[in-house]
Amino acid sequence: MISARAWADAQLLWDFQRMDHEPRPCSVAIGLGSHDLGVADTTVDLYRQGMAPLIVFTGATSLTTRDRMPRGEAEHYRDRAVELGVPADVILIEPKARNTGENIRFSRALLEERRVPVSSVLLVSKPYEERRAYATARKLWPEVGWVSASTPMTLPDYVGSIGDERLVIDMLVGAQQRLMIYPRQGFMIDQTIPDDVAAAFERLRREGFTSRLIPEREGRLV
């Protein structure tokens, strides 16, 4: 049983991760691959709203996606988008990235190779990783404007969609940890962490929500 205190702390982390950017038209939308097909769905919704004329889906496979998405996260995202009516010729695939830093670097290289002019990017991620993705992108590609986006939903709704409440809190704690240690390693821009968010992270860590944490001395990948 997860305590009311733990849920309140998880809500603090959830709220902090959400950037609350207002979507606006950008040069391209980049959908970050993961286990969550909702990222593809939200990218499609934004495309339909005229927020980007071109989509890049980026991602290989991971331990959590290799069985569900054997051809790679980006390929399955593209299939989903085409199924939802997006023309295949406005979708580019980047199939090699295995972490957020590679998502950004490899997508940039693909767009430069295709000679796509980019002044702004609509960055679509999982709801609990908006800020992490944004901080990484700002560090690795500072020349463009970034607008962070994800599926608009509440923490309870997201828990319901995943079906594993403890895993969701573990993922929130892991995302928060990376926001706190990766700037020191040069992988992200610095983010000001409010005291109540830092305290919530520590309480959840002490309570054992640690499956997505990394040893700080080994934290080399974003």
Image: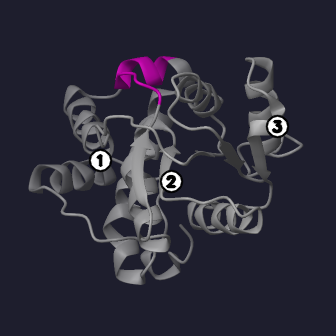
Answer above or below: position of 62 versus 97: above
Residue 68 appears in view: no
Q: Nearer the viewer, mark 3 or mark 2?
A: 3
Disc 2 residue type (three-letter): Arg
Q: Are marks 1 and 2 in contact (CB under 8 Å)?
A: no
Tag of residue 204: 1
- Quadrant occupied by the N terminus: top left
Residue in the picture at 25% in, 64% down: 191
Residue corresponding to mark 3: 89
- Disc assigned to residue 153: none
Q: Position of residue 33 (x, y in %)?
A: 66, 45
Calculate the distance from the C-alpha at mark 3 to the C-alpha at mark 2: 37 Å
* Residue in front for this viewpoint, 66 or 44: 44
Which residue type carries mark 1? Leu
Q: Earlier in the sequence, mark 1 or mark 2?
A: 1
Residue shown at 48% from the left, 45% from the top: 26
Tell me which residue sits at (34%, 71%) in the image: 189
| Secondary structure under the numbered disc 2 in the rendered image | loop
Residue carrying label 2: 212
* Residues at circles 3 and 1 in contact by the CB criterion of under 8 Å: no
Label 3 vs label 1: CA separation?
A: 45 Å
Q: Point out residue 150 in the picture as x, y percentages from the top left corner.
A: 46, 34
Q: Position of residue 174 (x, y in %)?
A: 43, 54
Q: What whole-number distance in Å separates the C-alpha atoms at marks 1 and 2?
A: 12 Å
Q: Residues within 10 Å of mark 2 (few under 14, many from 20)?
A: some
Q: Quadrant of residue 193?
A: bottom left
Highlighted magenta segment, given as a residue range: 151-160
Q: Position of residue 113 (x, y in %)?
A: 76, 68
Name the amino acid, label 3: Asp
